[in-house]
Amino acid sequence: MGLENILAIAQKPGLFKLVTQTRTGFIAESLIDGKRISVNIRSNVSLLSEIAIYTLSEEVPLREVFKKIKEKENGEATSISHKDSKDVLEEYFFAVLPDYDEDRVYPSDIKKVVRWYNLLQQNNLLDLLEEQEEVTADEEE
C-alpha cells in the first residue's frame, strides 16, 4: 500500500484509507477515528499521490514535501500545529520548502499539509513515502 491508497475527501476532515471499491463508489476508513464510510463515485476525492505543491520553478509532489518534513522533524510529529497562526505556518513551510510559491500556496493548504503529515505519522504510515519510491524504481527497470 502506498500513498495512492490514501485519500482526501472534500467536506470530510482528515485522511482516509481506501478499503474496497463498490458498484457506486468505494469504502474508506478514517485515519482519525477508524470509522468506515461509503463514498459516492461523484464525491470530490483526491489521492495523496496525485497532489503537488507549487514552487517558483516546478510542482513538487506531496510525497517529497512529506519527506522533507520527516527529515526536519526526524520522523516525529511536526513542531507546530495546523491550528497555529498564518505567520507561524508560513515560516515553518518556508523552512521545509524555501521556494514554495506564496501566491499559489495558501495558508489553508499549509494547514492541510501539516495536518496530513501528522495523521500519517500518528498512524505509522510515513514508511509509505519510501515504498512509493521503491515501486517507482522497480517500474523503471
Image: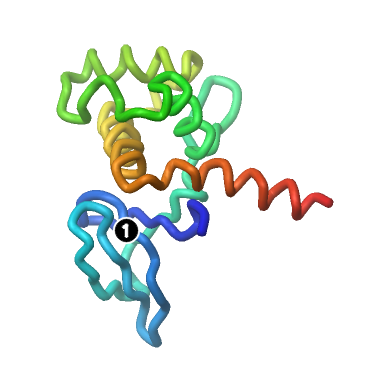
Tell me which corner region of the image, top left, top right, bottom left or bottom right, holds residue 109: top left
Q: Position of residue 90 (x, y in %)?
A: 31, 17
Q: Is residue 136 left or right of residue 11?
A: right
Instruction: Give the crowd class for mark 1: few <14, some 14-19, many >=20 residues within 10 Å.
Output: many
In this view, the residue farthest toward the right is 141
Tell me which corner region of the image, top left, top right, bottom left or bottom right, holds residue 10: bottom left
Name the residue at 30% across, 25% down. Answer: 78
Q: Position of residue 1 (x, y in %)?
A: 51, 59
> Of residues 130 and 65, which is closer to you in this image?
130
- For numbered disc 1, what is the local secondary structure? strand
Q: Position of residue 7 (x, y in %)?
A: 38, 57
Name the residue at 39% across, 83% down. Answer: 22
Pointer 1 residue = 16
Residue 115 in the image: above or below residue 13: above
Q: Position of residue 48 (x, y in %)?
A: 44, 49
Name the residue at 67% across, 47% down. Answer: 134
Residue 99 in the image: above or below residue 112: above
> Of residues 118 and 75, which is closer to you in this image?
75
| Amino acid on which disc 1 is placed | Phe
Name the residue at 41% across, 29% down. Answer: 75
Q: Is residue 16 left or right of residue 53?
A: left
Q: Is residue 136 left or right of residue 84?
A: right
Residue 40 in the image: above or below residue 11: below
How is colour applied across the structure in the image?
rainbow
Q: Is residue 93 left or right of residue 80?
A: right
